[in-house]
Amino acid sequence: MAHQGGRPGRFSRRTLLSAAGAALVSADLATTARAGVLVDRRFDRMRDRDGWGRHCYARHFSLVFDVHRGRGRLHLPAGLKSTAPGQPIPVFLLDHECRDAAHELHFQVTHGDLRPGIVLHRHDAFHYLAVTVEHRRIVLASYSRTERNVLAHARVVGLDTARHVLRVAVSGRTLKAGVWRAGHPPSMQLAARLPSVVGGTPGVLLVAPADRKPGSLLVSRYVLSARGFRPTAPQSAVLVTGTPQANGDGITVGLRAACDVPASIQFEWSSDPSFTRAVERSAVHRPGPPFSARDQIVLTNSHPVYWRARFVSTGSRAVGISRTQQYTPQLGAGRLVMGAASCAHLWQQPAYNGLARLLDVAPAAPALLVYQGDLGYAGNSRFSSYIEAPDFYFERFTRALSDPHFAAVRRRVPLGFTGDDHDYCQQNNAPPSRFPTWSLPLWNHVHADPSALGYYDVRFGDVHCFTLDGRRYADPVEQPNTPAKTKLGTAQRDWLESRLAMTDASLAVVFSADIFASRPNPDCFLFGWPDEYRRLMTAFMDAQLRGVRVVVLSGDAHGLRIHHHPDPAARPQAAGLSIVEFICSGLSPRSWEPATADDGTLDPQRSVMQHRGLGMIDIDPPGTPGRSVTLRAISGEDGGPDDLFPPLVLDYAPTPDRSLQLRPAPAAPPHFESGPLE
């Protein structure tokens, strides 16, 4: 019988080797399949559709992820110049957890610098092993919350747009992997020893290209064989106890939970930490991406309450139970401790040690930690998310919140949020007109605050706390100043002034993501919105003149420093009084930004730069003789003292301090340096 297109009975040596190699690979897969289970996802036989079919899950829901012309397509648009290196975009094959297995990916790429691969042993959304093809190498790497670590690699022929096959076989701690052009003999180039013998969910991976050019991964076939598969248990991506609110004779507190896979969410709470008795449950929430839900509980006593989230996966109906969170109501009768933190870089950053130290040094359990913006720097000039899209931003937020010290704080301390520029968009100091339409709704999937407006207030006995959002309602910083120019927006500013004027508290603590004091660019109340600066400082001083101490805890400008703002009107009755502003930023700062050299409101003994840290306010219980308020800059660095500068102790009541040489706040410079995009 003649072979069409060639001489009868004649085959090339390459064809014979390729056929023999393919037969060996197929035999290996078949042997594994006979011992267990074989998954053979043939995209070349599927009709066009969204997604890659049952069990395939991509957290990055903004991307093109479909079956198109017989190939599973995952398209990545052009990346931002500021992008962090090595950002992974996985597609997990849920409910197929396995250990020893053989994986085979038949694929093409439309751009040779794309880095496709196979996921092995996923532990959670951020921790897994993977083998990728990149830069004339086949690479085994471990992926974590803030980076990836290359474990082994071998040279291969450079990837082009032709069809290729990637094969990975795992047996115990032994891994063998190879990549070859389709139709060529199989070649296993990499042999490595895995860090441990573990199992986990497999899948397909695309690592963002270093040149940031757009491209697609096109998969015609994905084969997986193993001795058996287990369901993927859903896990928490975010758990937050929100800022508590007085509610008649009780307290209302919001709860936030997000899942790492598609799942329904139900909240459970009890006074019993073992959840064996008196368990109450919320309604079942069935959210869409990013699979985040909020509910609230009402408490009528000051006993601790324990809560957790129950997740039921949309696919296999596997159940996952989150770690237990504890909330202990504080009604203001005892010592009140609160923290303020901001500006946490993510990529290639160490853990947020300041959060651990806050718990260690706090003289009482903190009643609240307010996170004041720039949560992982999703949008930034350096190490940003790969693209400006809701899924990439939400993943960045969850990566920052998954820091182990952050998780430990969240398990015991209510967490409030104020957003800042890098939480809302890519452009530094952008006005709300430049925010993507999805940014504010997305931010409301992160927190459990009592308001979706970005600002709210809370009472702890005779202490009244306010949070401010200086971004989402702000006029552009470059807009010429007039009395009408506002950073807070008229509704938020009117709310603050009204609440402050009517409060019967004796201490007001204002948490603001944005600073009032000077910095070497106009993005501060003092320089960018000077009329509003004077208006608000006057309102704060009015409160002090009627006996309400006002303390501001702000963030944004990287550094920890104290300012004493005098009365803008220099009223005789305000002599010796100042509004104390404590700038406490950031958890992982870079080197900016100090006060301007002529800013006489700065406390020179209490100003540090280029140090990690956060702020703590410690308020004596009511009735304490000589009751005081202490402001501490808690170090976030290993070793050394707990405090980055001497704690500032203030009388609880606003008291003139004749030892201070109060000077007016400086006027705006005639021009500004080009501020860093942080």
Image (cartoon, rainbow, N blue to C red):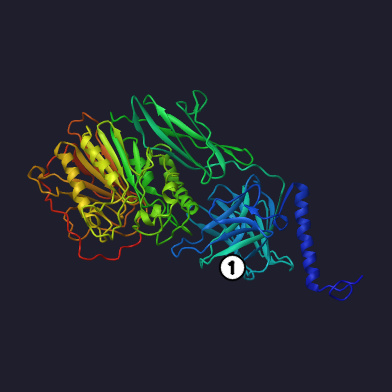
Question: Which quarter of the figure has residue 334?
Answer: top left
Q: Is residue 283 visible?
A: yes
Q: What crowding class fits label 1: few (fewer than 14 Cα within 10 Å), some (14-19), or many (20 or more)?
A: some
The three-letter code of the residue at mark 1 reads His
Query: Which is nearer the eye, 275 or 350?
Result: 275
Is residue 658 left or right of 557 when viewed as pictured?
Answer: left
Quadrant position of the C terminus in the picture: bottom left
The residue indicated by pointer 1 is 111
Up-down relation of residue 536 to residue 433 (above or below): above
Query: Which is nearer the eye, 573 or 207?
Result: 573
Residue pictured at 20% horizontal, 63% vertical = 669
Residue 363 place in picture, x, y as percent: 30, 37
Quadrant position of the N terminus in the picture: bottom right
Q: Is residue 632 visible?
A: no
Up-down relation of residue 218 to residue 656 (above or below): below
Residue 378 place in picture, x, y as percent: 43, 55
Residue 352 place in picture, x, y as percent: 40, 49
**Helix, strand, or loop for circle 1?**
loop
Q: Residue furthest bottom?
A: 7
Residue 259 place in picture, x, y as percent: 52, 42
Query: Which is nearer the eye, 442 or 462?
Result: 442
Q: How many marks?
A: 1
Question: Which quarter of the figure has residue 547?
Answer: top left
Is residue 468 left or right of 155 when viewed as pictured?
Answer: left
